[in-house]
Amino acid sequence: MGWPEVLADMGNRVTDTRRFLQQGGQPPQAFVLPDDLGPLPDELRLAAAALLADTHRAEAEVEMARDRLGSPARIPVPAAPPAYVDTRA
């Protein structure tokens, strides 16, 4: 697998992440950069920089969704009734 395929895979994962945020389902697998790629070719630097910026935007979208889901104002959680346990025998 070379740099063009790696960048395409990363782009697909960003797209899959956005689809997951909108539609639910199975989240995309974590990305692992192959060890044997070597340096990024000069002709792919602009594409890699654009992908990095898109990745940062998707990361912000994930964080906003996480914060929205974790906000008590957005998710009403009923208070549990008090429970008392008598330990006297």
Image (cartoon, grey):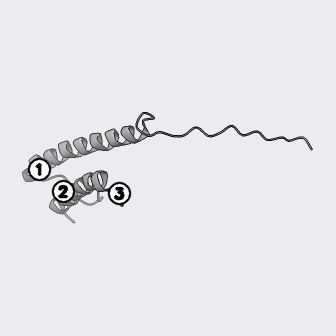
For the view shown, which residue lies furthest in the right direction? 89
The amino acid type found where label 2 is placed reads: Leu
Q: Left of 73 or right of it: where is 64? A: left
Residue lying at 26% horizontally and 55% vertically, measured from the top left? 19
Question: Judging from the image, what secondary structure is the residue with disc 1 in?
Answer: helix
Question: N-terminal of the two: label 1 or label 3?
Answer: 3
**Along the line of sight, which residue is nearer the eye, 32 or 11?**
11
- In three-dimensional space, the C-alpha distance between marks 2 and 3, rounded to whole angstroms, equals 19 Å
Q: Residues within 10 Å of mark 1 (few under 14, many from 20)?
A: some
Q: Label 1 to label 3, Cα distance in Å?
A: 24 Å
Disc 2 and disc 1: Cα gap in Å?
A: 8 Å
Q: Residue at x 86, y 41 (%)?
A: 87
**What residue do we see at 18% from left, 59% from top?**
8
Q: What residue would you read off at disc 1?
A: 47
Q: Earlier in the sequence, mark 2 or mark 1?
A: 2
Q: Secondary structure at mark 2?
A: helix
Q: Tell me, yes or no, whether the two marked residues, 2 and 3, touch with CB atoms within 8 Å.
A: no
- x and y, in percent, of residue 1 in the image: 22, 66
Residue matched to label 2: 7
- Compared with 13, 70 (above or below) is above
Which residue extends farthest left?
A: 43
Give percent across and percent down for residue 30.
35, 56
Q: Amino acid at mark 1?
A: Ala
**Nearer the N terminus, badge 2 or badge 3?**
2
Circle 3: is it few (<14), some (14-19), or many (20+) Cα within 10 Å? Answer: few
- Disc ID at residue 27: 3
Q: Quadrant of residue 50?
A: top left
